[in-house]
Amino acid sequence: MSKKFDEHLIHTYNRSLVLTKGEDVYLFDDKGNKYLDMGAGIAVSALGYSNDEYKQALKDQIDNVIHVSNLYYTEPSVKAAACLAKGSGMDKVFFTNSGAEAVEGAIKLARKYAFVKNPESKGEIIAMNHSFHGRTMGALAVTGTEHYREPFEPLIGGVSFAEYNNLESVKKLVTKDTCAIILETVQGEGGIYPATEEFLQGIRKICDENDIAMILDEIQCGMGRTGKLYAYEHYGIKPDIMTTAKALGCGVPVGAFAAVSKFADAMCPGDHGTTYGGNPLATAAVCKVYEIFEKEHIVEHAAKAGEYFYQKLQALAQKYPSHITQIRGKGLLLGMEVTCKPADIMQKALEKGLIVLSAGSNVVRFAPPLIIEEKHIDMCCDILDEIFQAM
């Protein structure tokens, strides 16, 4: 099957199924097989696949206008920016097409702020080992995994890497030319590692003392996934610049970087741009997502469901200590560290009608739709129980 479908697709993914439709929290393939989706398109489809209000909002916008140039205002983009600013605590927003593009914009904004202060600034950036920020050249440059970077070097320069949750390692890298510290509030691809309170608050202090940008990547862990609208709300701090995407549009390609005015105002016309970013269709999706999140208390539900899921996975870990070494994460972004290859678990789960993800080299990742219910979590854990029992 893969040979047939890969004939005209560049082989950058090892795909296994032909998925044709979704209903509620389930996906269906071209043979009619049904799968409980505990990956949500990698943390994207927060509302699942059957929210009629969301679908209707997109249909209505298509009937009006899908795209206009960013030389003009549109009502959906202005409204969506206000929703994002209010939800994140930021002041100003720039919409992109993806998370990687949001990271690119955040880097440019931090460097522009430094340049305005001092045109001689080298614009150095501190990032984290084992981080993941995207596949474009700028985002790749601040991604702390060598095998992602090496085939595409030289990337943008001036980037150094500290150890996540090790504040002293960050302090050692700060120089007069440092313009930003960038990190995920919860490391996702690196293995589902939440930041410690000491670490995040310490970085906030470093940035304040040195007048440099604290950039938090909330692309995967934001939009309610950890039981707060944005994960940094758990820590009593606020970044200077944040990036968001994935569940921001619940399937429509849209991302954004947002910033407090102090940094946002460093940008002027011509500094950054996008043809499609923030178009009426994408931002209509953003508006409706925020509306549904508030009306249906999606974030609160995610917090409650996440705690239930965590306890169920902990019970599995206690039952199978030779196979499961740790459960970690926040809300409905959870990781199960295993002693076997995560790909083996993923394949066995798929055969039993369950979709799960991996993270790092030894973690099975769960990032289900935020509307998931306890019965779905029970079903997932029962299938995992069967898999580990057979092992």
Image: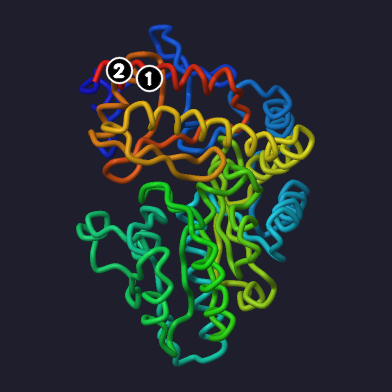
Residue that appears at 38% across and 37% down: 336
Residue 374 coordinates in the image, percent (x, y): 59, 22
Residue 50 coordinates in the image, percent (x, y): 63, 20
Secondary structure category for the residue under label 2: helix
* Cβ–Cβ under 8 Å for marks 2 and 1: yes
Residue 320 coordinates in the image, percent (x, y): 32, 28
Residue that appears at 72% across and 49% down: 80
Identify the coloring.
rainbow
Quarter placement of the C terminus = top left
Residue identified by numbered label 1: 385
Kind of residue indicated by mark 2 = Gln
Query: In front here: 72 or 13?
Result: 13
Kind of residue indicated by mark 1 = Asp
Judge from the rendering whether residue 53 lies leftward or rightward of residue 193; answer left or right: right
The number of numbered discs placed on residues in the rendered structure image is: 2
The vertical placement of 152 against 278, above or below, is below
Query: In front here: 195 or 122?
Result: 195
Quarter-of-image position of residue 33:
top left
Give the crowd class for mark 2: few <14, some 14-19, many >=20 residues within 10 Å: few
Q: Could you say which disc has been placed on residue 389 in the image? A: 2
Judge from the rendering whether residue 187 lies leftward or rightward of residue 75; answer left or right: left
Q: Distance between the residues labelled 2 and 1?
A: 6 Å
Judge from the rendering whether residue 364 lies leftward or rightward of residue 34; answer left or right: left
Quarter-of-image position of residue 60:
top right
Judge from the rendering whether residue 85 lies leftward or rightward of residue 345; answer left or right: right
Secondary structure category for the residue under label 1: helix
Residue that appears at 51% across and 85% down: 115
Residue 250 coordinates in the image, percent (x, y): 59, 36
Residue that appears at 52% across and 67% down: 198
Give the crowd class for mark 1: few <14, some 14-19, many >=20 residues within 10 Å: some
The vertical placement of 232 against 368, above or below, is below
The vertical placement of 117 against 277, above or below, is below
